Image: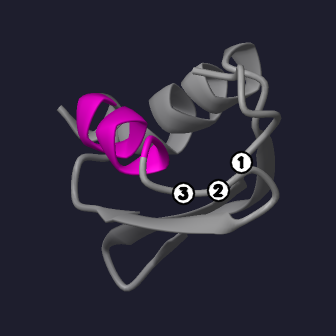
């Protein structure tokens, strides 16, 4: 579910802008960066802090999904 929510939220972000994702699902630490890279976005950071997954993604070109 975190990947789907991140994908939906990314639709509202302009190319070059950042999206911060915070998730409790431990699988998100691998799943969201994998999706982001294949969709043409840049993963700026991905880490686990205080039991939460924190991922920062820079949106790629307008055609990236």
Say few, some or many: other residues with alpha carbon within 10 Å of mark 1 (under 14 / 14 to 19 / 20 or more): many
Q: Image quadrant of residue 16?
A: bottom right
Q: Does the magenta portion include 17?
A: no
- In this view, 7 is above or below 54: above
Q: Position of residue 22 (x, y in %)?
A: 36, 68
Tell me whether circle 1 and circle 2 mark residues in contact (CB < 8 Å): yes
Of 3 and 27, the residue lying toward us = 3
Q: Position of residue 38 (x, y in %)?
A: 71, 14
Q: Image quadrant of residue 50?
A: bottom left
Tell me whether circle 3 and circle 2 mark residues in contact (CB < 8 Å): yes
Q: Name the residue under label 1.
A: 59
Is the stretch drawn in magenta largely helix, strand or loop? helix
Q: Earlier in the sequence, mark 1 or mark 3?
A: 3
Tell me whether circle 1 and circle 3 mark residues in contact (CB < 8 Å): yes
Q: Mark 2 points at which residue?
A: 14
Residue 25 is left or right of residue 26, and the answer is left
Residue drawn at x 34%, y 71% is 52
Residue 38 is left or right of residue 50, and the answer is right
Q: What element carries label 2?
A: loop
* Front: mark 1 or 2: 2
Measure the C-alpha gap from mark 1 to mark 3: 7 Å
Q: Is mark 1 on a helix, strand or loop?
A: loop
Q: Position of residue 34 (x, y in %)?
A: 63, 23
Measure the C-alpha gap from mark 3 to mark 2: 4 Å
Q: Is mark 3 on a helix, strand or loop?
A: loop
Q: Mark 3 points at which residue?
A: 13
What's the magenta region?
4-11
């Amino acid at each position: 579910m975190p990947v789907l929510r991140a994908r939906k939220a990314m639709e509202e972000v302009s190319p070059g802008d950042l999206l911060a994702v915070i998730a409790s699902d431990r699988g998100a630490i691998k799943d969201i960066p994998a999706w982001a890279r294949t969709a043409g976005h840049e993963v700026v950071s991905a880490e686990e802090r205080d039991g939460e997954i924190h991922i920062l993604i820079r949106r790629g070109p307008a055609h990236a999904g």
